Amino acid sequence: MKNLEPVAVSGAGRIDTLDSLREHLQWAVELEHATLPPYLCALYSLDPERNPEAMEVVGSVFAEEMLHLALAANLLNAVGGRPRLDLPGMLPPHPRRLPHSDVELSLLPFGPEALEVFLRLERPAPPGAPPQGDGYETIGQFYDAIEQGLRHLCEQLGEREVFCGDSARQVNGSHFRHTAGSLFAVEDLESALGALEEIVEQGEGTARGEVWDGDQDVFHPDRDEVAHYYRFQELKLGRRYQRGDTPQSGPTGEPISMNLAAARPMRPNPRLSDHASGSAIRTAQEEFNRTYCTLLNQLEQAFNGDPKQLGAAVGTMYALKAQAGALMLMPDEDSTTAGPTFEYVPPEQRS
Protein backbone atom coordinates (compact mmCIF):
# COMPACT_ATOMS: atom_id res chain seq x y z
CA MET A 1 0.00 0.00 0.00
CA LYS A 2 1.14 3.53 -0.70
CA ASN A 3 2.96 5.57 1.93
CA LEU A 4 0.93 8.59 2.93
CA GLU A 5 2.62 11.92 3.43
CA PRO A 6 1.61 13.42 6.77
CA VAL A 7 -1.60 15.36 6.26
CA ALA A 8 -3.39 16.94 9.19
CA VAL A 9 -6.80 15.52 10.01
CA SER A 10 -8.53 18.16 12.08
CA GLY A 11 -11.18 18.29 14.76
CA ALA A 12 -13.41 15.29 15.40
CA GLY A 13 -11.72 13.42 12.55
CA ARG A 14 -8.36 13.10 14.30
CA ILE A 15 -7.33 9.57 15.23
CA ASP A 16 -4.59 10.00 17.83
CA THR A 17 -5.68 7.65 20.63
CA LEU A 18 -6.62 3.99 20.75
CA ASP A 19 -10.14 4.92 21.84
CA SER A 20 -10.50 7.20 18.82
CA LEU A 21 -9.20 4.44 16.54
CA ARG A 22 -11.74 1.98 17.95
CA GLU A 23 -14.51 4.55 17.56
CA HIS A 24 -13.61 5.14 13.90
CA LEU A 25 -13.39 1.42 13.18
CA GLN A 26 -16.88 0.97 14.65
CA TRP A 27 -17.93 3.74 12.27
CA ALA A 28 -16.34 1.64 9.49
CA VAL A 29 -18.49 -1.33 10.54
CA GLU A 30 -21.55 0.95 10.44
CA LEU A 31 -20.52 2.40 7.08
CA GLU A 32 -20.09 -1.01 5.45
CA HIS A 33 -23.40 -2.20 6.86
CA ALA A 34 -25.20 0.93 5.61
CA THR A 35 -24.43 -0.04 2.01
CA LEU A 36 -26.19 -3.40 2.32
CA PRO A 37 -29.93 -2.45 2.35
CA PRO A 38 -29.72 -0.28 -0.82
CA TYR A 39 -27.80 -2.95 -2.70
CA LEU A 40 -30.20 -5.65 -1.51
CA CYS A 41 -33.28 -3.73 -2.68
CA ALA A 42 -31.80 -3.29 -6.15
CA LEU A 43 -30.74 -6.94 -6.21
CA TYR A 44 -34.11 -8.26 -5.03
CA SER A 45 -35.88 -6.23 -7.73
CA LEU A 46 -33.98 -7.95 -10.55
CA ASP A 47 -35.12 -11.06 -12.43
CA PRO A 48 -32.12 -13.32 -13.13
CA GLU A 49 -33.66 -14.49 -16.41
CA ARG A 50 -34.37 -11.01 -17.79
CA ASN A 51 -31.46 -9.05 -16.31
CA PRO A 52 -28.62 -11.52 -15.73
CA GLU A 53 -25.77 -9.03 -16.26
CA ALA A 54 -27.20 -6.39 -13.93
CA MET A 55 -27.91 -9.06 -11.33
CA GLU A 56 -24.32 -10.35 -11.63
CA VAL A 57 -22.91 -6.85 -11.04
CA VAL A 58 -25.14 -5.88 -8.10
CA GLY A 59 -24.79 -9.32 -6.54
CA SER A 60 -20.99 -9.24 -6.79
CA VAL A 61 -20.82 -5.77 -5.21
CA PHE A 62 -23.12 -6.85 -2.37
CA ALA A 63 -20.96 -9.93 -1.69
CA GLU A 64 -17.83 -7.79 -1.57
CA GLU A 65 -19.50 -5.31 0.79
CA MET A 66 -20.13 -8.25 3.10
CA LEU A 67 -16.40 -9.00 2.84
CA HIS A 68 -15.60 -5.37 3.68
CA LEU A 69 -17.89 -5.58 6.71
CA ALA A 70 -16.00 -8.65 7.92
CA LEU A 71 -12.62 -6.98 7.33
CA ALA A 72 -13.77 -3.87 9.23
CA ALA A 73 -14.81 -6.15 12.12
CA ASN A 74 -11.41 -7.87 12.00
CA LEU A 75 -9.68 -4.47 12.15
CA LEU A 76 -11.77 -3.42 15.14
CA ASN A 77 -11.19 -6.72 16.95
CA ALA A 78 -7.46 -6.51 16.25
CA VAL A 79 -7.14 -3.26 18.20
CA GLY A 80 -9.18 -4.46 21.16
CA GLY A 81 -12.62 -3.23 20.14
CA ARG A 82 -15.97 -5.00 19.94
CA PRO A 83 -17.94 -4.84 16.66
CA ARG A 84 -21.59 -3.92 17.23
CA LEU A 85 -24.31 -4.51 14.64
CA ASP A 86 -27.49 -5.39 16.54
CA LEU A 87 -28.37 -1.80 17.45
CA PRO A 88 -31.35 0.44 16.62
CA GLY A 89 -28.99 3.08 15.21
CA MET A 90 -27.89 0.68 12.47
CA LEU A 91 -31.30 0.99 10.81
CA PRO A 92 -32.50 4.61 10.70
CA PRO A 93 -35.32 5.44 8.26
CA HIS A 94 -34.46 5.80 4.59
CA PRO A 95 -33.50 8.06 2.93
CA ARG A 96 -30.59 8.31 5.34
CA ARG A 97 -27.02 9.54 5.38
CA LEU A 98 -24.00 7.30 5.20
CA PRO A 99 -22.62 7.37 8.78
CA HIS A 100 -20.57 10.53 9.42
CA SER A 101 -20.98 11.69 5.82
CA ASP A 102 -23.39 13.71 3.67
CA VAL A 103 -23.78 10.90 1.11
CA GLU A 104 -27.50 10.04 0.95
CA LEU A 105 -28.75 6.45 0.66
CA SER A 106 -32.20 5.37 -0.51
CA LEU A 107 -34.03 2.07 -0.90
CA LEU A 108 -34.82 1.86 -4.62
CA PRO A 109 -35.50 -0.76 -7.27
CA PHE A 110 -32.78 -1.26 -9.85
CA GLY A 111 -32.75 1.54 -12.42
CA PRO A 112 -31.10 4.86 -13.31
CA GLU A 113 -31.88 6.47 -9.94
CA ALA A 114 -30.39 3.56 -7.98
CA LEU A 115 -27.29 3.60 -10.20
CA GLU A 116 -26.73 7.29 -9.41
CA VAL A 117 -26.94 6.52 -5.68
CA PHE A 118 -24.39 3.69 -6.09
CA LEU A 119 -22.03 5.82 -8.19
CA ARG A 120 -22.08 8.55 -5.55
CA LEU A 121 -21.50 5.98 -2.83
CA GLU A 122 -18.52 4.33 -4.56
CA ARG A 123 -17.03 7.51 -6.07
CA PRO A 124 -13.21 7.48 -6.02
CA ALA A 125 -11.37 10.10 -4.01
CA PRO A 126 -9.94 12.85 -6.23
CA PRO A 127 -6.13 12.86 -6.66
CA GLY A 128 -4.49 14.44 -3.63
CA ALA A 129 -7.72 14.44 -1.59
CA PRO A 130 -6.94 14.73 2.14
CA PRO A 131 -7.78 12.04 4.70
CA GLN A 132 -11.12 12.76 6.38
CA GLY A 133 -11.96 11.00 9.62
CA ASP A 134 -15.38 12.65 9.92
CA GLY A 135 -17.64 14.41 7.43
CA TYR A 136 -15.83 12.54 4.65
CA GLU A 137 -16.61 13.18 1.00
CA THR A 138 -15.57 9.72 -0.20
CA ILE A 139 -15.14 6.38 1.54
CA GLY A 140 -11.51 6.26 0.40
CA GLN A 141 -10.74 9.47 2.29
CA PHE A 142 -12.30 8.02 5.45
CA TYR A 143 -10.14 4.91 5.22
CA ASP A 144 -7.08 7.08 4.51
CA ALA A 145 -7.70 8.75 7.86
CA ILE A 146 -7.84 5.34 9.56
CA GLU A 147 -4.62 4.31 7.84
CA GLN A 148 -2.94 7.52 8.99
CA GLY A 149 -4.19 6.96 12.55
CA LEU A 150 -2.91 3.38 12.56
CA ARG A 151 0.54 4.44 11.37
CA HIS A 152 0.70 7.29 13.89
CA LEU A 153 -0.35 5.12 16.84
CA CYS A 154 2.06 2.33 15.89
CA GLU A 155 4.88 4.89 15.83
CA GLN A 156 3.82 6.38 19.17
CA LEU A 157 2.85 3.25 21.10
CA GLY A 158 4.35 0.31 19.21
CA GLU A 159 2.49 -2.34 17.23
CA ARG A 160 2.04 -4.69 20.18
CA GLU A 161 0.22 -2.00 22.17
CA VAL A 162 -2.04 -1.11 19.21
CA PHE A 163 -2.82 -4.67 18.08
CA CYS A 164 -3.86 -5.89 21.51
CA GLY A 165 -7.03 -7.78 20.54
CA ASP A 166 -7.80 -11.47 20.97
CA SER A 167 -6.69 -13.29 17.79
CA ALA A 168 -9.40 -15.93 18.35
CA ARG A 169 -12.01 -13.30 17.40
CA GLN A 170 -10.61 -12.95 13.87
CA VAL A 171 -12.74 -14.29 11.00
CA ASN A 172 -10.78 -15.61 8.03
CA GLY A 173 -11.29 -17.34 4.69
CA SER A 174 -12.05 -20.67 6.32
CA HIS A 175 -15.18 -19.07 7.78
CA PHE A 176 -16.26 -16.97 4.81
CA ARG A 177 -16.84 -17.91 1.19
CA HIS A 178 -16.69 -15.06 -1.21
CA THR A 179 -16.74 -14.30 -4.93
CA ALA A 180 -13.49 -12.33 -5.15
CA GLY A 181 -10.94 -10.71 -2.89
CA SER A 182 -9.86 -12.36 0.32
CA LEU A 183 -10.82 -12.36 3.98
CA PHE A 184 -7.88 -12.70 6.33
CA ALA A 185 -6.96 -12.19 9.96
CA VAL A 186 -5.66 -8.78 11.05
CA GLU A 187 -2.86 -9.07 13.59
CA ASP A 188 -0.33 -6.30 12.88
CA LEU A 189 0.18 -3.13 10.87
CA GLU A 190 1.00 -4.97 7.66
CA SER A 191 -2.19 -7.06 7.68
CA ALA A 192 -4.25 -4.03 8.79
CA LEU A 193 -2.96 -2.00 5.83
CA GLY A 194 -3.75 -4.96 3.59
CA ALA A 195 -7.34 -5.01 4.85
CA LEU A 196 -7.74 -1.28 4.19
CA GLU A 197 -6.26 -1.72 0.72
CA GLU A 198 -8.67 -4.58 -0.06
CA ILE A 199 -11.67 -2.47 0.95
CA VAL A 200 -10.66 0.69 -0.92
CA GLU A 201 -9.38 -0.94 -4.11
CA GLN A 202 -12.47 -3.10 -4.55
CA GLY A 203 -14.56 0.05 -4.25
CA GLU A 204 -12.69 2.58 -6.35
CA GLY A 205 -9.83 0.81 -8.16
CA THR A 206 -6.12 0.20 -7.66
CA ALA A 207 -3.66 3.05 -7.28
CA ARG A 208 -6.44 5.63 -7.37
CA GLY A 209 -7.02 6.19 -11.05
CA GLU A 210 -7.22 2.61 -12.29
CA VAL A 211 -10.45 0.94 -13.38
CA TRP A 212 -9.37 -2.46 -12.04
CA ASP A 213 -9.40 -3.71 -8.45
CA GLY A 214 -6.44 -6.07 -8.71
CA ASP A 215 -8.41 -9.35 -8.77
CA GLN A 216 -9.50 -11.63 -11.58
CA ASP A 217 -13.20 -11.54 -12.47
CA VAL A 218 -14.61 -14.68 -10.86
CA PHE A 219 -17.46 -14.90 -13.39
CA HIS A 220 -15.13 -14.30 -16.36
CA PRO A 221 -11.65 -15.61 -15.46
CA ASP A 222 -10.16 -14.23 -18.67
CA ARG A 223 -10.92 -10.66 -17.49
CA ASP A 224 -9.50 -8.42 -14.82
CA GLU A 225 -12.11 -7.46 -12.24
CA VAL A 226 -13.51 -3.94 -12.40
CA ALA A 227 -13.84 -1.91 -9.17
CA HIS A 228 -17.34 -1.21 -7.85
CA TYR A 229 -17.57 2.36 -9.13
CA TYR A 230 -16.65 1.28 -12.64
CA ARG A 231 -18.97 -1.74 -12.57
CA PHE A 232 -21.83 0.69 -12.07
CA GLN A 233 -20.43 2.88 -14.85
CA GLU A 234 -20.59 -0.18 -17.11
CA LEU A 235 -24.28 -0.58 -16.32
CA LYS A 236 -24.99 3.13 -16.73
CA LEU A 237 -23.17 3.35 -20.09
CA GLY A 238 -24.19 -0.11 -21.35
CA ARG A 239 -20.67 -1.30 -22.17
CA ARG A 240 -17.88 -3.23 -20.44
CA TYR A 241 -14.39 -2.00 -19.71
CA GLN A 242 -11.61 -3.86 -21.49
CA ARG A 243 -7.82 -3.87 -21.12
CA GLY A 244 -6.41 -0.48 -22.01
CA ASP A 245 -9.49 1.44 -20.88
CA THR A 246 -9.09 4.19 -18.30
CA PRO A 247 -11.49 6.32 -16.24
CA GLN A 248 -10.98 9.02 -18.87
CA SER A 249 -11.65 6.77 -21.89
CA GLY A 250 -14.71 5.12 -20.38
CA PRO A 251 -15.66 1.55 -21.28
CA THR A 252 -14.97 0.52 -24.89
CA GLY A 253 -15.62 -3.22 -24.64
CA GLU A 254 -18.61 -5.38 -25.46
CA PRO A 255 -22.15 -4.08 -24.87
CA ILE A 256 -24.12 -4.94 -21.74
CA SER A 257 -27.79 -5.63 -22.23
CA MET A 258 -30.32 -4.51 -19.64
CA ASN A 259 -34.09 -4.51 -19.53
CA LEU A 260 -35.03 -1.74 -17.13
CA ALA A 261 -38.72 -2.38 -17.65
CA ALA A 262 -38.25 -5.89 -16.25
CA ALA A 263 -37.14 -4.67 -12.81
CA ARG A 264 -39.87 -4.93 -10.20
CA PRO A 265 -41.18 -1.38 -9.54
CA MET A 266 -40.66 -1.34 -5.78
CA ARG A 267 -42.06 1.67 -3.94
CA PRO A 268 -39.08 3.96 -3.11
CA ASN A 269 -38.06 4.14 0.55
CA PRO A 270 -40.98 2.10 1.91
CA ARG A 271 -41.87 2.32 5.61
CA LEU A 272 -44.09 0.30 7.91
CA SER A 273 -46.12 3.43 8.59
CA ASP A 274 -47.25 3.46 4.93
CA HIS A 275 -49.69 0.64 5.74
CA ALA A 276 -52.18 -0.15 8.50
CA SER A 277 -51.22 -2.56 11.22
CA GLY A 278 -52.40 -6.05 10.32
CA SER A 279 -52.46 -5.38 6.56
CA ALA A 280 -50.88 -8.01 4.33
CA ILE A 281 -48.02 -5.77 3.20
CA ARG A 282 -47.19 -4.51 6.68
CA THR A 283 -47.30 -8.04 8.11
CA ALA A 284 -44.86 -9.23 5.42
CA GLN A 285 -42.59 -6.24 6.02
CA GLU A 286 -42.57 -6.91 9.75
CA GLU A 287 -41.58 -10.52 9.09
CA PHE A 288 -38.72 -9.36 6.85
CA ASN A 289 -37.51 -6.91 9.52
CA ARG A 290 -37.48 -9.63 12.17
CA THR A 291 -35.40 -11.83 9.87
CA TYR A 292 -33.02 -9.01 8.97
CA CYS A 293 -32.42 -8.12 12.60
CA THR A 294 -31.78 -11.80 13.31
CA LEU A 295 -29.09 -11.58 10.60
CA LEU A 296 -27.53 -8.56 12.32
CA ASN A 297 -27.43 -10.51 15.58
CA GLN A 298 -25.83 -13.53 13.91
CA LEU A 299 -23.16 -11.35 12.30
CA GLU A 300 -22.46 -9.59 15.59
CA GLN A 301 -22.01 -12.96 17.31
CA ALA A 302 -19.77 -14.18 14.46
CA PHE A 303 -17.54 -11.13 14.83
CA ASN A 304 -17.42 -11.48 18.60
CA GLY A 305 -15.91 -14.93 18.98
CA ASP A 306 -18.48 -17.31 17.44
CA PRO A 307 -17.52 -17.54 13.74
CA LYS A 308 -19.78 -20.53 13.09
CA GLN A 309 -22.66 -18.04 13.20
CA LEU A 310 -21.59 -17.00 9.69
CA GLY A 311 -23.00 -20.31 8.47
CA ALA A 312 -26.31 -19.55 10.16
CA ALA A 313 -26.24 -16.07 8.61
CA VAL A 314 -26.04 -17.58 5.12
CA GLY A 315 -29.27 -19.49 5.78
CA THR A 316 -30.89 -16.30 7.05
CA MET A 317 -29.87 -14.53 3.83
CA TYR A 318 -31.81 -17.11 1.80
CA ALA A 319 -34.87 -16.50 3.96
CA LEU A 320 -34.53 -12.74 3.40
CA LYS A 321 -34.37 -13.23 -0.36
CA ALA A 322 -37.57 -15.26 -0.35
CA GLN A 323 -39.37 -12.77 1.90
CA ALA A 324 -38.28 -9.78 -0.21
CA GLY A 325 -39.30 -11.58 -3.40
CA ALA A 326 -42.76 -12.16 -1.98
CA LEU A 327 -43.04 -8.48 -0.97
CA MET A 328 -42.12 -7.34 -4.46
CA LEU A 329 -45.01 -9.34 -5.90
CA MET A 330 -47.53 -7.48 -3.71
CA PRO A 331 -49.12 -4.46 -5.48
CA ASP A 332 -48.73 -1.16 -3.68
CA GLU A 333 -50.01 2.29 -4.67
CA ASP A 334 -49.23 4.17 -7.93
CA SER A 335 -48.35 1.02 -9.90
CA THR A 336 -45.54 0.13 -7.50
CA THR A 337 -44.96 -3.05 -5.53
CA ALA A 338 -44.20 -3.39 -1.85
CA GLY A 339 -40.64 -3.69 -0.62
CA PRO A 340 -38.60 -4.30 2.53
CA THR A 341 -38.31 -1.39 4.97
CA PHE A 342 -35.19 -2.41 6.97
CA GLU A 343 -36.51 -1.16 10.32
CA TYR A 344 -35.12 -2.27 13.66
CA VAL A 345 -36.93 -4.89 15.74
CA PRO A 346 -35.85 -5.30 19.39
CA PRO A 347 -34.60 -8.81 20.25
CA GLU A 348 -37.61 -9.61 22.45
CA GLN A 349 -39.96 -9.00 19.49
CA ARG A 350 -38.23 -11.36 17.07
CA SER A 351 -39.63 -14.81 16.45
Image (spheres, rainbow, N blue to C red):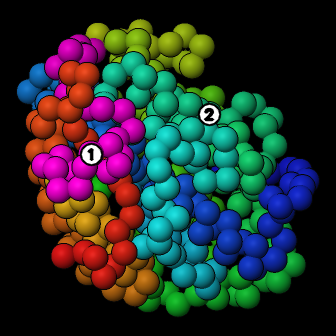
**Which sits in the foreground, 5 or 68?**
68
Dominant secondary structure of the residues highlighted in magenta in the image: loop
Residue 187 left/right relative to 331 = right
Q: Classify residue 205 as left or right of residue 53.
A: right
- Residue 165 x, y percent position in the rendering: 58, 87
Q: How far apart are marks 2 and 1 (CA)?
A: 39 Å
Determine which residue is flagged by label 2.
124
Position of residue 125 measured from the top left corner of the image (x, y, whole percent): 68, 35
Relative to 38, is 14 above or below?
below
Answer whether residue 278 is magenta in the image.
Answer: yes
The secondary element bearing badge 1 is classed as: loop
Q: Give the left or right position of residue 130, taking residue 113 as reference.
A: right
Helix or strand or loop: what does disc 2 sit on? loop
Whether residue 141 is in magenta: the answer is no
- Quarter residue 46 falls in: top left
Residue 275: which numbered mark, if any?
1
The residue drawn where x is 60% and y is 13% is 248
In the image, 34 versus 180, the foreground residue is 34
The residue drawn where x is 25% and y is 75% is 350
Q: How would you rate the neighbour count of disc 1 (Cα within 10 Å): few for under 14, some for 14-19, many for 20 or more?
A: some
Disc number for residue 249: none
Residue 130: percent from the left, percent from the top? 81, 43
Tag 2: residue type?
Pro
| x and y percentages locating residue 64 in the rendered image | 38, 50
Find the magenta span and give its range: 256-283
Work out which quarter of the rendered image holds the C terminus and state it: bottom left
Residue 241 in sight here: no
